[in-house]
Structures are given as structure tokens and as C-alpha cells.
Amino acid sequence: MTLGLFLLRRLVMILPMALFIVFCTFMLVRISGQDPIHLLTGPTASAAEIALVRSELGLDQPIWAQFGLYLLKLLRGDLGNSWITGDPVLGDVLACAPATLELMIWGVLLGALIGIPAGLGSATRPGGTFDQVTRTLSLLGFSIPTYWLGLVMMFVFFYLLGWAPPGIGRIGMMHSPPPTVTGSYLIDALLAAEWGVAHSAFGQLVLPVVCVTIIAAAPIIKQTRAIAIEVRASDAVRYAVASGLPLATERRIVLRNSATPLLTFIATEFTGLVGTTSLIEYVFAWGGLGQYGLTAITSGDFTAVQGYVLAIALFAALVLLVTDLIVIVIEPRASLRP
Amino acid sequence: MLLAVEDLHVHFISRSLRNRLRTARALNGVSFRCEAGEILGIVGETGAGKSLTAHAAMGLLRPPARLIGGSIRFAGRELASLPDAERRALRGREMAIVVQNAKSSLDALCRIGDQLIRLYRAHRGGGEAAARARALEVMAAVGIPDPERRMRAWPHELSGGMAQRVLIALALINEPKLLIADEPTTGLDVTVQAQILDLIVGLARERGMGVILITHDLGVVAHYCDRIAVMFAGRVVETGPVRAVFGAPAHPYTRALIGATPERLTIGRGTRQAGPPPPNLYALPEGCHYRDRCPVAGPECAAPPADRDLGAGHLAACWHAGAETSAAKLLQSRDGSA
Amino acid sequence: MTADPAAEATAEAGGGTARIAPLALVVGLARRSPTTLVGAAIIAAFAVMAIFAPWIMPYAPDFGFADRILQPPGAQHWFGTDGNGMDVFSRTVFGATYGFGIALPVVVVALSVGVPVGLYAGYRGGLLDEALMRLIDALRVFPSIIVALAVVAATSPSLLNIVLVVGVLDAPAFARLVRSEVLGLRASNFVESAIAAGNPTRRILFVHILPNAIQGAMAQTAVRAAWAVRISATLAFLGIGIQPPAAEWGAMIRQGAEFFVTGEWWVGVFPGIALVFMVLGLNMLGDGLQELLDPRRKADAR
């Protein structure tokens, strides 16, 4: 009951923001001055044909009416059709999302597995050798352009060493995707016991995931270090030391008290990684949502852009919601009531 | 002798923006003793080094504070040279501290009962049940009503006074030989304050626990303590039995602290120093540190004063101490008759 | 611990900031934090490269030798030649001009938008403040690269436009910082007494609050410049932004992308390395600046 109320309140809070975002994207598209008609009709269309398509799409209406029309369609779950391929945007977005999620989840998971211990280690002796090295590495992670890292990796591991498969897509040419259960090719292939497919999917996954991991780990290291230093200096930890609790207990208290801020940070980091992942997808022809969005933006396919933007916003809202729910579980001070 | 601190020097060493070393001489030869079953009050203005002395005695200094010299002997063992692990075992077991900031010092993510049990078992081992029984016992002893229910409370659910009592319960759960209480009653109302101090004094008398009570409140010292140590600029400038020191304050600073009216002491009103600024620890005057503020300073004060024995354990670090006692007595008797 | 001389000591050191001679400050900072020194050295090297590019470049950055296409690095072309026969070394050196040419104006735009907004929002508070902060929150949902890409694609990929878009997207970082500083300062005694003394709002904002609030923003400039260099290069890499054959690093990596899998690595690797080092240098410098100037970071010193 309380949970229901909490979710409802959240939904009410998200709605105006979602509306605002939809509005901004819509306006951005309209002010761009690009006329999509020619994309749709082709260069040979006559003036009458163009006018017909224009009125079919409602593009001859005033801009407010167009926005209202778009919202109405949106409420019915219709994101419109791509101006370039003509496919429904909703279907495209849903088809692409698992690929992106697979990449991001592995990347953030591994990034956290590396970043959190490194940051905690850094914080035990700020200014020490380990801290200096880790901080420099983390700065390097902040500074490497994602796409370039992907390209260099491809050059080294595909071209030079021949260890990695060509960076095209999520699965080798010889295999077909496994039956969908989770959406992750690797996990689905393992579930279906298609070992060859699993092997291929794993091979395709390694380089992009390593790239996302490196890019994701850098801020996690920095933030973990900052949080842990703050927690270590807190009254609670100083008191734990003063009351002679064993070192292991002290470490556990530090870790436990860092958990909430860390989790919140990783959640925002997760949504922020959408951009990074898009570039990785672009370089590795991953075929995910990020690549879909980038292609849509660069080619001027604006219904697709709108769908993509909406998908990102909903994804971010969902991640933040889940984070808040986890925080409520692990943090005695938090509660479902605001 | 339970605790004997001898000529303790602690400096804060930091680097200026120009990379020069800056040294704040926070403790400059602190010496005092505390016997088993004795209550020693340490008083002095903010920045005099009271808390720092307590932290140094507990082995809780952290950079930029550094122990420069001196000896801390606890029950015959030299603590300054004791390995870290052994000091950790002593803290919370043999010597316990009640810190300021009670609410923030408790582990926010651990229920009160679990914190008590955790501390008990960390030092004594044993089963959950024994620790729980002891926790309930000590909670009742410090006057926490309905201990069973409070065991399950989270720190953020406690009032300030209740948190303070929990902190005292934590300090007492392992029946330490020495209790250092750093302003244990700040922020509590007068009745609660009296309750808690009565409790501590009671335990000292019953179990022969040594108590070091750090406070701003001279009334508290007069009422509860056996001996007093007055600190100024990182030094004990006067120490002795409470009666002797209050009866015949030998150091000009002690006299300034007490003020001329003895009624203040019996009423128990706080004597916070409001007037002159605390001395600059980066540039203490040569000789007597109180020289700049002292009404009776003369040329001889350019040399550091040695402790003068005024009999019955009453010591004062002032060149004028011996000669001034009679004058002080005169002054006091005049005030008394007026 | 109320009686913590460490806190007093740090506060005192902070109070002295304004009075310290710049040179002594630099020397002291360098000794305290070698990272900052290395960062400053890298940026200085790039600045030299950008200023003296015409003398350093052995060839014109946009001249293609038709007979020397995709030559590997060697004595004639140190970094080899690209698919158009242009000298990669000359192009990489010239790229530094774009790096600074974008980063500096972007930071200026971001400061001149973000600081007044933060100042005003923080000082006035109320509905406007609330609305601005909500707007910034809404923007934060989207990765900045996506927003920049969408806006630049929807408008025009001219250099001026890129600077404006990236600058405006960078402004919220400054606005937030300044706002939180202002909120703290507003409640402070000296501002309250300035108000009580009957100073006009403008005077209070610019004389009493701004000089104190801007320190944190200034500390962020190097890091924000690093971000600007990165994002503008990314735009160029995606083909929305500075277009080849302009010798911009991102555009050069785009040109070199196809050659990574066919073995002509030098086309894309060298501009990438230059880009990494410039961003790294700015980040290292920024890290030191933050530690030095950001009042909240000073607590770390404990």
C-alpha cells in the first residue's frame, strides 16, 4: 500500500518532466528548418504527392496542433514511423534496447568491480603510492575518447593479434541469434545450450565491454575515493576506531556507510553512460539503441530521435526509481514517505 | 597509578600554499595523572587542547596531528610505543571514551542493541545471549527506559540525550578501568546532566574506575571532581585537589577562569571564556604562553615557568605562584566577607 | 571535536589565499602536487604547439600529396600520410589550434552564462531558482553528448554554433557551483551587514558576493575546458561538427577509423594520442586547481 503510494507519487513527479522533454525534442525538430517531406517522398515526387503526404502526416497543421497530435498518438503507445525506413519507432526501440542494456550492464558491473576496490584502496592512504597511481589511471580514463579507445582496441586485438573477431554486431556471421529469454545473446545462448553461439556472442562482447568498463571505472574510482575519505573522517568511523573495534569491523562500517552514496552515484553514472555506450556501439556496429539514436540524429530521422529521447528519459527515471527503492531497503533513515 | 601523562607534545604539521611547513604547537608538555577511582576534571577554554589530550591518550591522533614527544603510561604500560593492534585491543576494553557529537558518532546503519553487542563481543568474545544480557544491563544502568525496546531502535530515532546515554552505555559495557568523558553532557538539560554525571561518579566510586572529565563547566568540576587540571595553550598550568585549587588558585589564568565571585562555583553556572582570543598556536610567545594576557606578567615571564609545588599535590606553572598565594587568599577572604 | 586546531589551521591557510604572490603560489603548488605541474607542462607544450604551428609544421596541414597516399611513418612524413596524402604530423600539430580555439571560447561562454544565472538564482531564490534547477535536472537525464549532437545537428555545424551549444551545455555546471556558494554567502554575516548598510543589490552581488562565489567556478574551468575539447572532438568524429579536411583531431580520427582494421593505424592513432594528452593535461591541471581553490575540497586536507 505504502509502496503503491510511493510509486504513484513518483509517477506524478516524473510526468511533467517527461512532458517537458517531449516538448523540447519536438520543438527542436521543428525549429531545425529541415523538411522531412523529401526524405519520405523521394526526389521524383510531384507537388501534389508532396502535399498529400504532408496532410497525411499532419505537417500542414499549425505547430501546436502537430504537438497535440503527437501527444495523442503517444498516449496510445504510437511513437510514429521512422521517416527514413518507415518502420514503427516503438518496435525499433524495443528491438534495439536489449543490445544496449547487455553492453551497459556488463560494463557498469565490471567497472564497479574494479572501481570500488580501487577507490577504497586509494582512500585508505590518500597521497600514498597506490593512491597516486590509481588517481592518474582514473584521470586517464576520464581523458580517453571512447570511440578512439574502441578503434585502437580493434586495431590491436583484431588486426594485429587476431584474438578478437571483427567488431561488427553482437554475434558472428555464421551464427543466428538464440531464442530470446533475457535479451542478452550470451545468457540466452547459454540457456539454450547453444555453445557455439554463446562462444561467438562472448567473443563479440569482450572488446566493447572492456571499453565501457574502462570509461565507467574512472569516475567510479574517483567518487568511491571521495566518499570513502569522507566516511572515514566521519564521527561514526572515528568513534568505531576509538572504541577499539577490530580492523575488519571498522572496514565493514566504512563500506556499509559508503554504500548508499555510492549506489546513488553509480545509478546516475549508469544513465550518464548512455552517451558513452552510444559511441562504443557506433564503433563496433553493435546495433543497439545508442547506435540507433546516433544514426537517427545524424541522418535527420526525427520521429526516431523523439522515440529515442523518450526511451532514454524513461530508462533514467526507471534506474533512479529502482535505486531509490534499494536505498529504502538498505538505509534505515530512508522511508517510503517523503 | 592508572594513567600518567608526562610532558606530552603534539603538533599539527601542515603545508602552506607555498609548500612551507607550518607547525601549530597544540600540546606543549602536558602532564597529569589519574588514579583508579579518582575523578579528574580538565578545564580550559576552547583550543586549549583538552580534547586533543584525550585523543592523544587514547591513541587516536590522526594527521595532521602528530605525537612529538612525551610518555603516556597506562596501568604501567607505555602506550606511545605500543603496537597499533595492542592499543586497539585496549581501547573500548581497558580505556573507553565518551566523545562529543553523540548522535553522529553512533553507526547510523546499526541498531543500538547490535552496536552494544558488537562492541562487547569484539573485546570479550562469547555468545550473543551473554552479550545481549550485558547490553540490557548496562542500558538500564545508564538510565535508558525500556531497554528491550531501545535495543531495536536506530540511532536516528534517538533524542540527543538518549544518544548521549547510549554512548555512555557503549563506553561502560566492557567495564573499563579508565573512562575519558569529553563534555559528556553538552546539549543536555540540567536534570539529565546531573543524572548522567551522578551515574559516572557512582561507577567510579563503586568499581574504582578512573574518570577524566573534560568540561567547560567549573561548577561540574567543583561538584563532581576530586582533582582538577587547568589547561591553557596546550599545557596544564595548574593542577591539584579541587578544594585547594578553587580555594587558592595560584595561576593568574585559573583566577581569570574562576572569576572573583565564589558564588558562581556553588551555583554551578558555566564559565565560558568570552573575552580575549585564544593564543595563536603557530606563534606562541616565548616563555610563559599566558604572558600576553596576564595582568601580573613581569620580565621574568620571558623564561618558561617550571611547575611550582604548593603542597598537597597542588602545582602551578607560574613564576609568581608561590608569592601570590597569600595575596590570592587575601583576595578570596575579602570577597567572602563582602 | 570543537577544539580542533587542524580546522583552525586550514581555515587560516584558506584566508591567506588572496594575499599570496602568484609565482610563489605556482611553485608551492607544483611541489605539493606534481600532478598539477605535469598537467600545466602538458598544456604549456600544447599552447606552444598551437602558437608556433606554422613554424613547426613541415607541410601545409591540408595539402594532399597525390602520390604519397597512406604512407607509413618515416623520415619524410614522421607520422605518415592519410588517405588524401596529407601529412599526419602537420595535421596533428595544427589540431592544437582547434583544441584551444574551441576550449577557450567555450569556457568563456559557459562562465558568462552560468555565473550570472547561478548568482541570480542563488541570491533571489524562489520560483525562478526552483524552475532553473529543475531545468538543469531535466537536462542532466540526457548525456551531454547526445544533447549537443541533437542541437548541433538540428541547427548548423559551424564553428561558432558548436562553441555556443557546447558552451551553453557547459553552463549548468558553473551555475550550480556558483548558486550553492551564493546560498552559503547570503546567510553570512558580512553580506547581511552589507545589506543592512543599505548597499544596492547590484553592489552586493558584484562587490560582496561574486568575488567570493567565483572561486569554486574558477577552479572548475580547466576540467570544463577538458570536457569541451572532448565533446567537440566527439562531434567532429560523428561527422556533426568540424568537417574534414579541416585538421581537427576528432575529424582526423573519423578519417582514420576505417584504416584501423586494415592496418594503416597512424592516420587515427596520432590525433587520438594528441587528444588524450590535451584532455589529460587539462584534467590534471583541473584536479590541482580544484584542490587549491574549491573551498569545499579543503576539508579533504584533514
Image (spheres, rainbow, N blue to C red):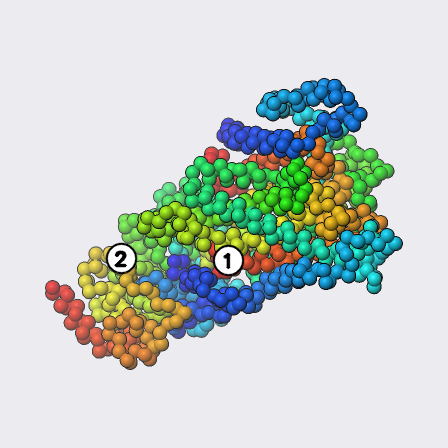
Q: Is residue B99 left or right of residue C32?
A: left
Q: Which numbered mark, 1 or 2, is in the foreground of this view?
A: 1
| Mark-to-mark CA distance, 1 and 2 | 40 Å
Q: Position of residue A297 (x, y in %)?
A: 69, 36
Q: Is residue A262 visible?
A: no
Residue picked out by circle 2: B270
Q: Secondary structure at mark 1?
A: helix
**Other residues around mark 2 within 10 Å, as few (<14) / some (14–19) / many (≥20):** some
User: In the image, what residue type sits under mark 2?
Assistant: Gly
Q: Is the N terminus of chain C in the top left, top right, bottom left or bottom right quadrant? A: bottom left
Residue at 82% of width from left, 34% of height from top? A176
Kind of residue at disc 1: Leu
Expressed as whole percent of the image width and height from the top left, the position of residue B232 reads 33, 68
For the point 21% across and 75% down, the residue is: B324
* C191 sits left or right of A228 in the view: left
Q: Give the residue drawn at x 51%, y 65%.
A: C22
Residue A291 in view here = yes
Does residue B133 appear to the left or right of B183 in the view shown? right
* Residue C38 placement: quadrant: bottom right
Identify which residue is drawn at 58% across, 35% down: A317
- Give coordinates of residue B273: x percent, y percent: 29, 61
Relative to C159, is A200 on the left or the right? right
Q: Chain of mark 2?
A: B
Q: Quadrant of residue B49?
A: bottom left
Label 2 near label 1: C-beta < 8 Å? no
* In the rendered image, the vertical position of residue B72 relative to residue A192, given as above or below: below
Q: Which residue is mark 1?
A: C293
